[in-house]
Image: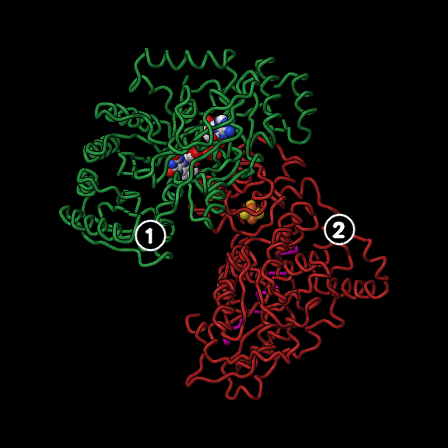
Chain colours: A green, B red
Amino acid sequence: MLEHAVKSELIALLGDRFSDEPEILTCYAYDSFLEESMPDAVIFPKTTDEVAKIMALANRAKVPVTARGAGTSVCGAPIAAEHGIVLCFSKMDKIMEVNTADRYVVVQPGVINGDLQKVLAPSGFFFPPDPGSMNFSTIGGNVALNAGGPRCLKYGVTKDYVLGMQVVLASGKVVRFGSKNIKDVTGYNFTSLFCGSEGTLGMVTEVTLKVIARPETTQTLLVTFADLDSTARAVSDIIGSGILPVSMELLDKMTINAIEDAVQMGLPREAGGTLLIEVDGSREACDRERSQIVHKVKEHNVMAVEEAEDEADRNRLWAARRAAYGVFAKIAPDILSEDVTVPVSKVPEMIRRIYQITEKYNLKAGVLAHAGDGNMHPLICADRKNKEEWKLVKKAFREIFVAGAELEGTLSGEHGIGLAKAEFLPLVMDQESRDFMACIKKAVDPNNILNPGKFV
Amino acid sequence: MRESSGNCGKCGICLSVCPVYKVLKEEQASPRARVQLIRAYGEKRLASTPLLKELIAKCLMCGSCAANCPSGVDHYSSFMEMRSRLIDDHGDRLEIRGLVYLLARERRLRMAMGMARMGQGVLPDRVAARFKLGNIAVDRFPRLNSRQFRKTVPEEIAPAKEAGQERGTVLYFTGCASNYIYGETGEAVVGLLTRLGYRVIIPREQSCCSVPMLYHGGVDEALTNIEQNIKSFHRPDIKAIIVDCPTCGSALKHEFAAMMERFDRGELMRQKALDIAEKTLDIMSFVYSHLSEMRFSRDSSTPIPEGPVSYHLPCHLKNSFVSAERVLNNIAEVDYVAAEDTSECCGGGGTFFYEYPEVAGKIAGSKIDNIRRTGAKTWLTDCPVCRINLSARLDSADDITMMHPAKYLQQKLVDVIREEDGDCDSCNGL
Ligand SMILES: Cc1cc2nc3c(=O)[nH]c(=O)nc-3n(C[C@H](O)[C@H](O)[C@H](O)COP(=O)(O)OP(=O)(O)OC[C@H]3O[C@@H](n4cnc5c(N)ncnc54)[C@H](O)[C@@H]3O)c2cc1C
Ligand code: SF4
Ligand code: SF4
């Protein structure tokens, strides 16, 4: 419970944009992850100035503050683990400047990624990071989780597009990093530090993003393989030969069938694995890359190659990919989707290990991957109420992370650490490195009020 | 209570399609939140409170969340059940209760409409402009039919003479709106069907589709009504049941059978309801299946305003049937301009526009801005509530006429050219 004085001050500042009713708080106790925790209050600031006042107050009263965008994190990052205030940015949703001549946009953090794309589309520009949640997740959340998406194989992740930002520190002080310049090596690169910081270092209240010109054409292929190992080998072979598609999405047999059961999109149920491959650029470049890819996949036990004929066809294939996460929820009450990433040459080995581990424990599991950048999402469908099964799920994931670490991989390619993976951090970061993170955190947030209980 | 939230993966996909969330940008106004609130209530983490009722009720029941949920969560049924539970606990606004009471019996509704008509007649315009329902001035609401539409036509109407040989019989569910408010829509539907060669039966015994009652806790009343409708609509000899209102249509398609099952009304009633569901078709889909036989004219001597025509796609049409845009797009004589947000919700939602005028006003406001941008002089929409909600918010300076697409097409229809066998395509598969 918030102290009475803190509550009164917040109400004085925000009016009905403050709530501590249990019905409302219930709606801010979750994200797309399993664990939940009730905050004491939820607030909706509209300006940087309000955020600054809120932080100064919270710092003085030592109340935890957890930022929230749309709550689509799949690792529990915006869950108020130690209660306190959830500060929701969804109403700070203005696109403040679109400047295609200088190739940047300035946005408030609550702008939905997809809305930005819509505004940019007529000018022929786009913002490359396209998480599967792009139609509902916010730029603030994308920055704080350093979100990636299918296009990141070619275009990179959110941090590669953040030119500058305005941040409210725990103290309530407002600082700016970076600028509107594509080239800027002035001082520490704090914008990168904040990308992936999961709201533990400060509140991002404005972001300047680099945008780029939309390629002339995009071509999409759906390649079906007889078995998953061939699918994975095709991925590392294509990337290894120097071709760089925009995306290479891998779906295994279970995922394809789950999608077909749910939404009947005409995907090949008998395939061991499929790759949704997209190339973009000038027409000639696309044609060339596409035929190189078709040539390469044919060396790997390919069953069929389907080319999207038009935009509607492309959308159909992508809709299938985007539905993948949700359709698993149909299979079992609880879905755990992980995010282990390995160097792309190790993808076949990692997939083999994931299957060995889940089969050993007799778990229902599928693999979905942004395979071109080695980023895999093993998904396990289970029921938390079945305590025995749940123990096995946990064991399996630990082993998957250990396997990933052995293959020189990492804990998260895009979903972040949040509540889900803090305990696994030592697998990929030694004590000194974790101490260094803690040292930075202590310097900017000495009272540990920013999203406490997470990975630092 | 049925456990319908069990398999919500909390993915948030439904946030992107919910018209209420889009304007409020608060999780508590999202479908995902409603599912989680119902779950919390079911697990006894939340008590039944007026605020919980408000959070569950601040929903258009447009069905977009259910239509887009990859996990197949049945929002519709679980919201409906929760709404009635909360109304049982905390009551409803008096005027909404009154509405449910009226809709529950055709006789009561008839009487009330008669009185309302008299009221409209005696209320001076100056006064009417000052009174508001929701945030809409009373004088912006449509005038009621001077006579109930169903009274103006026989129960059975033969095919039009020029249609030649008869093609079969269809039933027409007029809904309350065409019967009491938009009689011209009813005339147009009958006109199109008979010109196409169909015998049209408008069962006298039909009553409200029950959706308003289901949304407002009148479950018992709804059940009686639905059973009555099933009895008068279940006829093995008919080819289709035509609806002009997408909400009635979605009730016939989904709710009738669901209610028979939920209240265990026996296998026979369930089968009859399923048969009705299968035969139910919206008038514009019916027209679409006959489009190749119909000839239209660009002739401006008809009373249709000149200039391009635009369209608003009602959510229940989008989520249960197919957009009438495909008809407009396929008639060369129609100068169709799509608005930027043709398929976005208008914020009407049954009584939503009355209960949450600010939210409805915001949702409708951007539709009005966009329709102005198209330059259209005629704005078509199938749903009577969308039409009331949108037309009432147009300025008199807008010079935009709203009507049902059936009315528009009927005015443009010059001729029906019968093809050889001439059977109704859409009915073949029924
Ligand atoms: C169906 C689905 C598909 C997904 N696909 C992808 C994918 O392809 N790639 C990917 O990377 N992720 C994906 N995600 C995960 C998630 O959507 C992204 O990480 C997204 O960036 C989260 O944005 P959000 O607005 O929902 O943020 P939230 O979940 O609300 O918050 C995420 C983190 O950001 C912090 N935060 C939010 N706003 C601010 C701010 N203004 N200042 C400081 N901290 C802030 C929060 O405290 C929290 O730690 C997916 C999720 C779902 C449900
Ligand atoms: S789309 Fe379905 S599964 Fe996803 S949050 Fe909404 S209700 Fe839950
Ligand atoms: S029915 Fe419509 S308004 Fe209600 S929650 Fe679903 S999408 Fe939102």
- Asked whether A229 or B159 is in front, the reply is A229
Instruction: Locate residue A241, reporting x and y percent.
Output: 17, 40
Is A88 situated above or below B288?
above
- Asked whether B125 or B152 is in front, the reply is B125
Image quarter in which the N terminus of chain A is found: top right
Q: Is residue B37 magenta?
A: no
Q: Are marks 2 and 1 on the same chain?
A: no
Residue that mark 1 sits on: A217
Query: Is B143 placed left or right of B12 in the picture?
Result: right
What is the number of the mark on residue B95?
A: 2
Kindly report which numbered mark, 2 or 1, lies closer to the viewer in this rendering: 1
Query: Is B331 placed left or right of B395 in the picture?
Result: left
What residue sits 48% from the left and 36% below the top? A138
Image quarter in which the C terminus of chain A is found: top left
Direction left: furthest residue = A299
Instruction: Locate residue B96, reporting x and y percent.
Output: 72, 51
